[in-house]
Image (cartoon, rainbow, N blue to C red):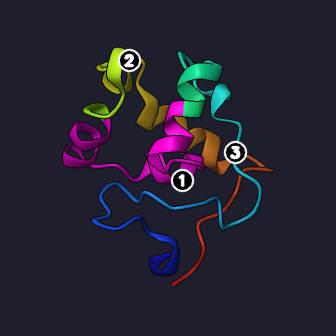
């Protein structure tokens, strides 16, 4: 994913949804259209990105969520995204 990582990348953030159509982040409990758009603006397009986050990644992204700070942990996004990323139709992380 290196060619499309954001400069100063943290948390697998991308400059664009370069690995197929973005996942419907609205499937994550607690994520509506506004928060989904904010995640896209931050560089999050796929469930697999969130599924791989560490505590440091969560803190980094959470700091950019403005009025939605705390939602990642409160709504348990990581375990949700592990399940969502495994479903048929979800984008797959590119190999290598």
Outermost residue toward the right in this view: 89
Give the magenta range: 38-61
Q: Main secondary structure of the magenta part?
A: helix
Residue at 58% over, 40% down? 83
Q: Residue 75: where, in percent of width, then height?
A: 42, 18
Residue 23, numbered circle? 3
Q: Is residue 42 magenta?
A: yes
Q: Residue 68: where, in percent of width, then height?
A: 38, 17
Instruction: Kindly report the distance in space between the C-alpha atoms of the residues bearing marks 2 and 3.
Output: 20 Å
Residue at 29% over, 19% down? 70
> Which of the two discs, 3 and 1, sits closer to the camera?
3
Residue 68, numbered circle? 2
Disc on the earlier residue, 2 or 3: 3
Disc on the earlier residue, 1 or 2: 1
Q: How many marks?
A: 3
In front of the other: 14 or 28: 14
């Amino acid at each position: 994913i290196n060619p499309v990582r954001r400069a100063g990348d943290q948390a697998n953030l991308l400059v664009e949804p370069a690995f197929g159509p973005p996942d419907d982040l609205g499937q994550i409990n607690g994520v509506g259209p506004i928060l989904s758009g904010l995640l896209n603006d931050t560089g999050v397009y796929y469930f697999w990105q969130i599924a791989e986050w560490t505590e440091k990644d969560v803190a980094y992204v959470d700091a950019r969520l403005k009025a939605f700070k705390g939602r990642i942990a409160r709504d348990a996004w990581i375990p949700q995204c592990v399940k969502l990323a495994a479903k048929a139709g979800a984008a797959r992380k590119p190999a290598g």
